[in-house]
């Protein structure tokens, strides 16, 4: 308990004056309640015994005034306590969530998602109950015991002493019978996969003590050279490698298409470049710096991902675009929408940019939602752009409508497009073909067609469906030396 308290008490620094005020309200409320007890005793033992209205009104008025004062002070203290507790919970959740973002990728393979959610919710609340509510509760308990004991001795010292004598016996009995109940509750929580101790929950020892990956570099002006050097990757818990000895380089301003049959390992490359995973073998680098030496937040600040599934928030169009770069002005948001060919249909909506959208409704088409996502990516203006199947799920007409905005988005960026749809492949500076996790071909559109290899086969099949199965290859194809 001391360890947990010492770790999390510093988070209350901004709220300690409020804690002092809350504790003061607790003390005043306890005094008022004690006074109300004594006045009520005076009212029943003396005024009512006399049967005189004149003797009744004065103590009755005093009791009512003290009770109202105590209720008002108690209400103010409780409101301030709830407000302070929620501020603490928000601050702690933000700290834990920020820490989670910097944890190494294998952390999320070693811990279940349910445990992480519980730590961000239940564990944080347990910590608050100990650090904030616990302090207020201890102050309240101490003053209530002292004042109520004094009031009991004042009213009937003999009965008060008898009660004080029996209190240890009652405490021991309650403790003895509570132990089996706690044991049963603990076993039930273990069966549910929960943490076995409230104190361990309060410590949050896995999330808050698991160190982020080692960071060795200082920020620099990122140019956008992306490199994979003899990268091999195997997903945690899997025996087979998804990628084998893959090497490629994409330089600033270069447009590289990564294609291949389904299951070739294309999307895995995007996950490695964003450090959702780290390579099992070899290394991935940005401007020559190993990705595992770069703070995750700094890396992702300079890499824009347009994922296969269009990510739309349950909010306005304006907020959906603005989340690409918080603090962007309305003019910058509108300019990004214009560049993404989205301004026209947005302006035609009754509420324009303030229209609330939901990805699961038919208010906007898939192509329109994709253009909003492209506008968000344009607003980010990061030097590296990763497009993961940007036209998946769109019909032919919608796909053609987003090709222009995609070209605009790629302008000046180091762009890796992972795709089955090869409409933009002829304009790529280079096309990289993966097959069975290996890099088997690299070159321009015309060069690869002339080879009549895997790429030519993909071009002849609708949406990249394999026409025939090619034989496996063990030869390493190093794209950088092609």
Image (tube, grey):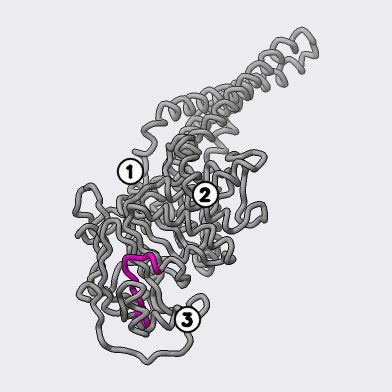
Bounds of the magenta span? 426-437
Looking at the image, residue 313 lies above or below residue 457? above
On residue 6, the disc is 1
Pointers 3 and 2 in contact (C-beta within 8 Å): no
Camera-near label (3 vs 1) is 3
> Residue 305 location in percent, x, y?
41, 57
> What residue is rendered at 32% in x and 69% in y?
430
Question: Does residue 239 appear anywhere in the picture?
Answer: no
What residue is pinned by disc 3?
A: 460
Q: Position of residue 140 (x, y in %)?
A: 50, 33
User: Toward the viewer: 230 or 233?
Assistant: 230
Residue beneath the point at 46% across and 62% down? 196
Closer to us: 98 or 267: 267
Residue 264 horizontal side relative to residue 215, left or right: right
Q: Position of residue 357 (x, y in %)?
A: 61, 48
Q: x, y (%) of residue 74?
A: 58, 27
Disc 2: which residue: 341
How many angstroms separate mark 3 from mark 1 (CA)? 66 Å
In the rendered image, residue 429 lying in the magenta stretch gets the answer yes
Disc 1 is placed on an element classified as helix
Q: Secondary structure at mark 2?
A: loop
Q: Mark number for residue 229?
A: none
257 versus 81 height, above or below: below
Residue located 44% across and 46% down the image: 324
Say what secondary structure mark 3 lies in.
Answer: loop
Callout 1 crowding tier (Cα within 10 Å): few <14, some 14–19, many ≥20? few
In the displayed structure, does residue 5 sit left or right of residue 129? Answer: left
Instruction: For marks 2 and 1, give the CA distance.
Output: 55 Å
Label 2 neighbour load within 10 Å: few <14, some 14-19, many 20+: many
Question: Does 341 sit above or below residue 246?
Answer: above
């Amino acid at each position: 308990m001391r360890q947990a308290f010492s770790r999390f008490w510093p988070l209350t620094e901004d709220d300690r004056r409020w804690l002092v005020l809350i504790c003061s309200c607790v003390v005043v409320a306890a005094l008022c309640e004690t006074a109300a007890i004594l006045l009520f005793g005076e009212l029943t033992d003396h005024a009512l015994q006399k049967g005189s209205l004149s003797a009744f009104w004065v103590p009755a008025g005093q009791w009512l005034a003290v009770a109202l004062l105590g209720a008002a002070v108690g209400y103010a203290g409780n409101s301030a306590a709830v407000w302070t507790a929620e501020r603490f919970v928000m601050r702690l959740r933000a700290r834990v969530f920020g820490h989670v973002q910097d944890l190494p990728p294998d952390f999320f393979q070693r811990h279940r998602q349910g445990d992480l959610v519980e730590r961000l919710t239940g564990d944080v609340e347990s910590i608050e109950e100990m650090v904030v509510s616990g302090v207020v509760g201890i102050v309240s308990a101490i003053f209530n015991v002292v004042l109520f004991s004094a009031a009991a001795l004042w009213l009937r010292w003999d009965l008060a002493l008898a009660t004080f004598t029996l209190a240890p016996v009652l405490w021991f009995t309650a403790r003895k019978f509570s132990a089996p109940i706690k044991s049963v509750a603990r076993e039930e929580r273990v069966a549910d996969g929960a943490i076995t101790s409230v104190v361990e929950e309060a410590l949050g020892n896995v999330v808050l003590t698991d160190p982020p990956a080692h960071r060795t570099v200082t920020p620099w002006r990122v140019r956008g050279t992306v490199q994979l050097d003899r990268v091999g990757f195997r997903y945690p818990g899997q025996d087979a490698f998804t990628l084998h000895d893959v090497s490629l380089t994409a330089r600033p301003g270069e447009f590289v298409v990564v294609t291949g049959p389904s299951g070739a390992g294309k999307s895995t490359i995007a996950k490695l470049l964003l450090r959702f995973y780290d390579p099992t073998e070899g290394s991935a680098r940005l401007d020559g710096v190993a990705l595992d030496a770069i703070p995750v937040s700094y890396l992702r600040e300079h890499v824009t991902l347009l994922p296969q599934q269009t990510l739309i928030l349950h909010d306005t169009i304006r907020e959906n675009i603005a989340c690409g770069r918080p603090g962007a002005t309305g003019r910058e948001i509108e300019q990004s929408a214009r560049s993404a060919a989205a301004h026209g249909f947005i302006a035609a909506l009754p509420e324009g940019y303030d229209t609330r959208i939901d990805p699961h409704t038919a208010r906007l088409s898939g192509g329109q939602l994709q253009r909003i996502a492209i506008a968000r990516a344009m607003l980010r203006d990061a030097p590296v752009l990763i497009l993961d199947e940007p036209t998946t799920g769109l019909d032919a007409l919608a796909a053609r409508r987003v090709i222009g905005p995609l070209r605009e988005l790629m302008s000046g960026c180091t762009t890796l497009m992972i795709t089955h749809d090869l409409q933009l492949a002829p304009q790529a500076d280079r096309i990289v073909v993966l097959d069975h996790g290996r890099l088997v071909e690299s070159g321009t559109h015309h060069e690869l067609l002339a080879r009549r290899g895997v790429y030519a086969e993909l071009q002849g099949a609708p949406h990249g469906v394999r026409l025939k199965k090619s034989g496996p290859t063990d030869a390493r194809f190093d794209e950088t030396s092609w």
